[in-house]
Image (cartoon, rainbow, N blue to C red):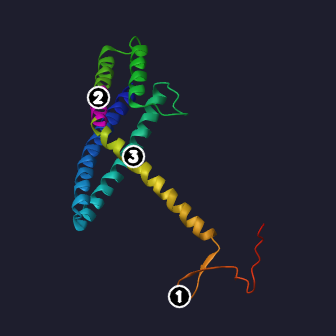
Amino acid sequence: MVELLKLLAQFLQCLRQQMTLMEELLVVIAREEELVVSFSLPEFEKLVTEKDQIVRLTQAAEERRLQLLKKLCFMMAFDARGRMPSLSEFITVARSYSQNVERLVDGETLDNLREALGEIEAVAVLYRSAFLHAQPRIEQNKMILKALAHNFKRSLMVLQNEAASTKRYNERGRSVENTPAKDGVAFVRVRA
């Protein structure tokens, strides 16, 4: 049980670190949008470097969170091999585990377990609030990415059509057909 409490403390610390990084990232993204609008390239380049560092730290924190979550699930006898539980699912699993072991552990350990779970629940509320606050930006970015993907597909189709086209260009840059025109007389049937 001592090991479980240590893992819960590390998990809580990791969640708090992720929350801090996410808040920093949102500030940087808002600043980045301002610089894009004002066309300030030197400042934008510095900001992109800063954003990349925050993203790398966020990725490392996420990897750490997943490792801890796997260990916690294993210790709580929850099968997480197929899919890792979300934070709210984990809280439900942990609360159930706490109820299952309440007769097996001493009161102080049970209180420590419940306190750790309460702190994780408090961070989960902060997570939800932060994501709800960021939801409009997320939806806007989804729309932008969908439009970019559509335009990219259209550009690819134009390029593929041009590549498949039989048109070529002469020495003056004018397009010419690959098959030379026949010299001679053209016949046309006309019905009377």
Q: Which residue is mark 1?
A: 172
Q: Amino acid at mark 3?
A: Met
Q: Position of residue 126 (x, y in %)?
A: 27, 32
Q: Earlier in the sequence, mark 3 or mark 1?
A: 3
Q: In the displayed structure, does residue 73 sit left or right of residue 2?
A: right
Across and down, in percent, residue 124 comes to 31, 30
Q: Please name which of the two marks, 2 or 3, marks the residue nearer to the observer.
A: 3
Name which residue type carries label 1. Arg
Q: Which residues are magenta?
A: 120-132
Q: Which residue is mark 3?
A: 143
Q: Nearer the viewer, residue 176 or 19?
A: 176
The label nearer to you, 2 versus 1, is 1
| Mark 3 secondary-structure assignment | helix
| Quarter containing the N terminus | top left
Asked whether the beta carbons under mark 2 and mark 3 sit within 8 Å of each other, the answer is no
User: Residue pushed farthest bottom?
Assistant: 171
Q: Which residue is mark 2?
A: 125
Question: The disc labelled 2 sits on which kind of residue?
Answer: Val
- Measured along the vertical axis of the image, is residue 111 above or below residue 26? above
* SS category of the residue bearing label 2: helix
Mark 2 or mark 3: which comes first in sequence?
2
**What distance separates the C-alpha of mark 3 from that of mark 1?**
43 Å
Q: Quadrant of the C terminus?
A: bottom right
Disc 2/disc 1 C-alpha distance (Å): 68 Å
Q: Does 56 appear in magenta?
A: no
Q: Residue at x 38, y 50 (%)?
A: 144
Main SS, magenta residues? helix
Residue at the spot 65% in from the left edge and 73% down from the top edge: 166
Q: Is residue 122 left or right of residue 179?
A: left
48 or 2: which is nearer to us? 48
